[in-house]
């Protein structure tokens, strides 16, 4: 069950929002978050980070597409902030026999209540949970990203921070979203807490994206460094998040249901903010409280697929050879209740509502966009071409037929779960012809590393879309030239790869303008160096810099198109 939220009240202002398109120098100087939140305080009289902003009075003609795109991204992130969602899902009913209510399901507090958590959004979730639970909470331990407390403090996001004298102990680790010794300390502390629980205790588990890196507990004799290196190699060869987590689970004491098994016989209640396509419980954060649907054979098949089976450390071989051949049966998890409280679908739904308020004809392509970043970029390029042909009145011609065929073929190759491209194109055809269009999507692409550059999947996707539009523009300048186009891709957690940026945006003009500065997009892409490209081009003007957002529901992509005023 997924909870939904209402957006906060309207902002009555005619001022244009100064949304976070910052130079690299500003980001490095620590000004990014200050500018974002000083704007929000000025407009709302409060500090709330990525709260939902209604801008109904700002019609498409009074704001640039870039400002609209960033406003919509901000709305998407704001609606999946952890504290409001957790407060909606979790309630405490006092009295002589206190109960914990989770989506109206009651759990008796027979004895002691404990809390553990791990993930990029968990600090805010824990702060809200402690406020709800009060003195009923005996003790808690959470593992969160390195530096998040300081970042949220500087951003004025006090509601996401624990109060003084909190009963929850915080471990920070996983620099650049990679397991490290600090995250290992947090995982060990969590493991020590849960193994001593009784049948009368209740364990509340808070889980969000990034939880896998923040809960490293390799099965002996595997060393953390060995497990981390294997994960890095898999990721560099293009392994999807589902494949990475399948391997992680087989090598972990806590993942793959391990945490829930250690907590038995205590009642376990998990509140989960999903960052995985389809919201599979056994994949999110590698499923520490869910029965795994994968076996050691699945793990071996993945290692074989990426040509790693015969180059494994001896410790990994030892663990895999002694692992059970079948997953743990579901009946061993009867003491566990897992509840999804937020997802990418919720974020896109709010962005759609905001876009329609801005006057756009809006469609959601999919909340499950996945696959090779190059193929996904081509899909978006073809979709933008079709939308421009539509605005130019050329969609029924030969070019329109060609582009529709390309889209159907690409959709078939990517096999995006739940996407019926033919039906989507029919819906698109029914939109009001001259109305500006917003296409929303979410998910998580895969980048196969070929170079040594610095970037993330969102920046690489934006640059590849920009390059594709540049090439198309040389062929069909008439249709692309008749439209204003913006494409934006950003990570809802505020961190795209090991960079300070959340993502980037592009337009059909980006590559040509960059060439005038001596920057060749193809050269940067060949080295997977998208961050360097966007940092140097117009001094970082096309980077999306938000700082850590306190939440994580994968990535959000936006296409905004309207007829040009020229």
Image: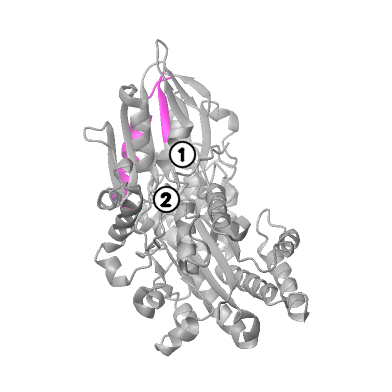
User: Is 466 drawn above or below residue 442 in the view shown?
Assistant: below
Q: Position of residue 515 (x, y in %)?
A: 45, 88
Quarter of the image for the N terminus: give it: top right
> Label 1 neighbourhood size at 10 Å, few (<14), some (14-19), many (20+)?
many
> In percent of the image, x 44 and y 80: which residue is there?
524
- Of residue 354 and residue 346, the one placed in the foreground of this image is 354
Residue that badge 1 annotates: 85
Count how many numbered circles sit on residues in the image: 2
- Of residue 175 and residue 306, the one placed in the foreground of this image is 175
Looking at the rendering, which quadrant does residue 417 occupy?
A: bottom right
- Of residue 286 and residue 14, the one placed in the foreground of this image is 14
438 sits left or right of 545 in the view:
right
User: Is 408 drawn above or below residue 303 in the view shown?
Assistant: below
User: Is 340 drawn above or below residue 532 in the view shown?
Assistant: above
Residue 261 shown in magenta: no
Residue 189 shown in magenta: yes
Residues marked 2 and 1 touching at CB (< 8 Å): no
Q: Earlier in the sequence, mark 2 or mark 1?
A: 2
Secondary element type, mark 2: loop
Residue that badge 2 annotates: 11
Please say whether residue 220 is visible from this viewpoint. no
Q: Position of residue 505 (x, y in %)?
A: 47, 70
Please say whether residue 335 is visible from this viewpoint. yes
Secondary element type, mark 1: helix
Quarter of the image for the C terminus: give it: bottom right
- From which residue to which does the magenta span run? 180-205
């Amino acid at each position: 069950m997924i909870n939904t939220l209402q957006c906060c009240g309207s902002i009555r202002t005619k001022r244009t929002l100064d949304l976070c398109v910052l130079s690299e120098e500003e980001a490095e100087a620590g000004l990014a978050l200050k500018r974002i939140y000083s704007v929000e305080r000025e407009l709302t009289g409060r500090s709330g980070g990525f709260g939902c902003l209604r801008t109904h009075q700002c019609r498409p003609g009074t704001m640039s597409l870039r400002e609209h795109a960033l406003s919509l991204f901000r709305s998407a992130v704001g609606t999946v902030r952890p504290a409001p969602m957790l407060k909606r899902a979790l309630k405490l009913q006092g009295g002589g026999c206190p109960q914990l209510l989770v989506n109206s399901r009651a759990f008796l507090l027979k004895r002691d209540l404990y809390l553990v958590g791990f993930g990029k959004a968990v600090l805010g979730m824990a702060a809200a949970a402690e406020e709800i639970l009060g003195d009923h909470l005996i003790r808690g331990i959470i593992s969160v990203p390195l530096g998040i407390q300081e970042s949220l403090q500087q951003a004025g996001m006090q509601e996401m921070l624990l109060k003084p004298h909190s009963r929850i102990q915080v471990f920070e680790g996983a620099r650049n979203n990679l397991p490290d010794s600090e995250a290992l300390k947090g995982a060990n502390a969590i493991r020590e807490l849960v193994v001593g629980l009784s049948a009368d205790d209740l364990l509340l588990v808070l889980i969000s994206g990034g939880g896998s890196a923040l809960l490293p507990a390799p099965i002996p004799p595997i060393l953390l460094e060995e497990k981390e290196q294997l994960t890095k190699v898999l990721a560099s060869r293009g392994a999807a998040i589902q494949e990475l987590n399948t391997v992680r689970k087989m090598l972990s004491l806590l993942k793959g249901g391990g945490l829930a098994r250690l907590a038995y016989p205590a009642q376990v209640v998990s509140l989960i903010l999903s960052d995985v396509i389809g919201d599979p419980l056994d994949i999110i954060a590698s499923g520490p409280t869910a029965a795994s649907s994968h076996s050691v054979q699945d793990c071996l098949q993945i290692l074989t697929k990426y040509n790693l089976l015969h180059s494994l450390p001896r410790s990994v071989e030892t663990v895999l050879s002694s692992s059970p051949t079948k997953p743990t049966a579901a009946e061993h998890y009867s003491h566990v209740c897992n509840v999804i409280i937020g997802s990418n679908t919720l974020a896109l739904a709010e962005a759609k509502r905001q876009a329609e308020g801005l006057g756009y004809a809006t469609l959601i392509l999919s909340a499950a966009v996945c696959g090779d970043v190059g193929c996904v970029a081509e899909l978006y390029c073809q979709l933008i071409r079709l939308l421009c042909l539509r605005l130019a009145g050329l969609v029924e011609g030969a070019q329109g037929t060609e582009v529709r065929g390309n889209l159907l073929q690409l959709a078939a190759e990517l096999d995006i779960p739940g996407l019926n491209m033919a039906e989507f194109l029919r819906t698109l055809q029914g939109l009001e012809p001259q109305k500006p269009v917003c296409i929303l999507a979410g998910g998580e692409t895969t980048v196969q590393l070929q170079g040594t550059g610095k970037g993330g999947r969102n920046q690489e996707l934006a640059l590849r879309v920009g390059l594709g539009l540049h090439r198309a523009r040389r062929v069909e300048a008439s249709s692309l030239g008749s439209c204003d186009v913006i494409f934006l891709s950003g990570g809802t957690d505020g961190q795209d790869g090991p960079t300070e940026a959340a993502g980037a945006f592009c337009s059909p003009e980006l590559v040509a303008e960059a060439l005038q500065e001596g920057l060749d997009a193809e050269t940067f892409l060949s080295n997977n160096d998208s961050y360097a490209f966007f940092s140097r081009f117009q001094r970082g003007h096309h980077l999306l810099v938000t700082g850590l957002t306190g939440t994580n529901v994968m990535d959000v992509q936006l296409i905004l198109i309207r007829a040009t005023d020229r």
